[in-house]
Amino acid sequence: AQSVTQPDIHITVSEGASLELRCNYSYGATPYLFWYVQSPGQGLQLLLKYFSGDTLVQGIKGFEAEFKRSQSSFNLRKPSVHWSDAAEYFCAVGYQGAQKLVFGQGTRLTINP
Amino acid sequence: GAVVSQHPSWVICKSGTSVKIECRSLDFQATTMFWYRQFPKQSLMLMATSNEGSKATYEQGVEKDKFLINHASLTLSTLTVTSAHPEDSSFYICSASDSDTDTQYFGPGTRLTVL
């Protein structure tokens, strides 16, 4: 069965520091992978996605993610975080194309000034 | 592009009443929409898949008679919570699947509080 693990429930980083959020997935075929961000009381905004091709994917707001098949990982990175990046981040794997999404538990990001 | 709206953004109702939530894809057509439920500090749980012009597909454990879904057009799906009870209080989020990009785009969510 498909599953997604985000090992870090809560991460705190200082403004301007680099960020890496981890995501591991379990899926038998080539996965469709997504990162979404959710601000408090809001819906989810798509940051980036990977379907095929270049394993380093660029997204919005300066985020990038790297697909590593050997490690079944799709970690999200940002070189320098801003206070506005504080939010909940969800990794998801899609199967049947994007017709079904399985979400990780989410990682809450706190930014220290 | 790829904007999805939900209405209302929040609703408070009395126990036993029904509540309808609308989900609209504003700039693309969506043959498939999805309804999720999210409890505080938890991830999203898929409730059902809404297919335009056909019956919705419900996930295991979701009562189809309680959560009525209608997808009458390519831009609108509705979720009706019938005979709501306090345990139905939650954050409900819809998404619409854009077949051109094979991506789900999410609405802003609806906070339902049942008194």
Image (cartoon, coloured by chain):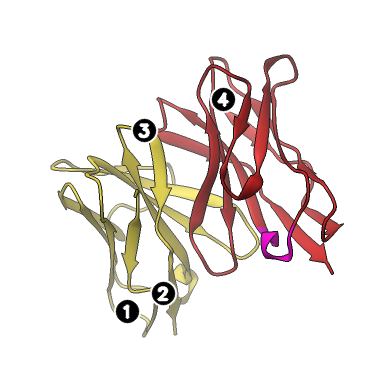
Chain colours: A red, B yellow
Q: Is A40 positioned to the left or the right of B19 in the image?
A: right
Which circle, 3 or 1, is nearer the viewer? 3
Q: Is residue B114 magenta?
A: no
Which circle, 4 or 1, is nearer the viewer? 4
- Labelled disc at residue A1: 4
Q: Secondary structure at mark 4?
A: loop
Q: Quadrant of the N terminus of chain A?
A: top right
Who's the residue at 59% across and 64% down the image? A39
Who's the residue at 29% across and 79% down the image? B17
**Residue at mark 3:** B101
Q: Which residues are magenta?
A: A82-87
Q: Chain of mark 2?
A: B
Q: Chain of mark 3?
A: B
Residue A7 image-quadrant placement: top right
Q: Residue type at mark 4: give it.
A: Ala
Who's the residue at 84% across and 69% down the image? A113
Classify mark 1: residues with Cα within 10 Å, few (<14), some (14-19) or many (20+).
some
Marks 4 and 3 sit apart, C-alpha to C-alpha, by 25 Å
- Labelled disc at residue B16: 1
Classify mark 4: residues with Cα within 10 Å, few (<14), some (14-19) or many (20+).
few
Residue A72's spot in the image, x, y percent? 70, 22
Q: Is B3 positioned to the left or the right of A23 in the image?
A: left
Mark 3 / mark 1, whichever is N-terminal: 1
Q: Secondary structure at mark 1?
A: loop
Mark 2 / mark 3, whichever is N-terminal: 2
Marks 4 and 1 sit apart, C-alpha to C-alpha, by 37 Å
